Image (tube, rainbow, N blue to C red):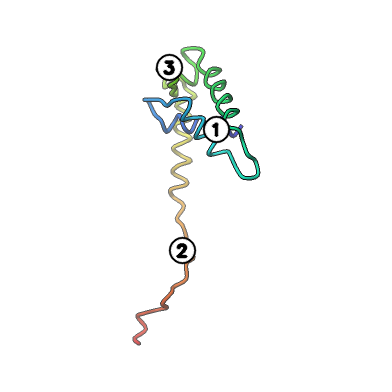
Amino acid sequence: MQYDKEILQVLIEAGCEGISVQKISRHVHNACNSLFNPLSQRDIHKYVQQFLLRNCKTDTSLVEKTKKGIYRLNVNNGMTQQLFLQFREDREIVEEAPEKDYSLDLFGNLDSGV
């Protein structure tokens, strides 16, 4: 689901320090909300809380709780290491794609010897 992917991306970007549930839910809401598909911040926050609680139950879970309300990815989990690699590859692909300049030259060729 789109929410799960956004939650994992935020946790990857947060790194070892972790991030609060409130900030994760705000990011997911901003990333998935649109004019044609409005979402409730309360519903998103509830989903994020349930996702994090569901995925931090054991020591080998995908997510681990550091402090009250602060979560991070569990570095001891093999799936987490795979997510880091996948996220890095996705980021490199986006950075490698050069943007083409489609802007028009406002003054024409100034070196034409005029």
Residue at x 48%, y 35% (from the top left corner): 86
Relative image position of residue 48 (x, y in whole percent): 54, 25
Report the quarter where the N terminus lies.
top right
Residue at x 51%, y 30% (from the top left corner): 25
Q: Which residue carries the number 1 mark?
A: 5
Disc 2 marks a residue whose amino acid type is Asp
Q: Total of numbered circles in the picture?
A: 3
Residue at x 54%, y 39% (from the top left corner): 31
Mark 1 element type? helix
Determine whether, in the image, residue 4 is placed left or right of residue 92. Answer: right
Relative image position of residue 76 (x, y in whole percent): 42, 19
Q: In this view of the protein, which residue sits in the foreground, 20 or 17?
A: 20
Q: In this view of the protein, which residue sits in the foreground, 82 or 59?
A: 59
Alpha carbons under labels 1 and 3: distance apart: 23 Å
Q: Which residue carries the number 2 mark?
A: 101
On screen, 111 above or below 40? Answer: below
Disc 3 marks a residue whose amino acid type is Lys
Q: Which residue carries the number 3 mark?
A: 68
Disc 1 marks a residue whose amino acid type is Lys
Report the quarter where the C terminus lies.
bottom left
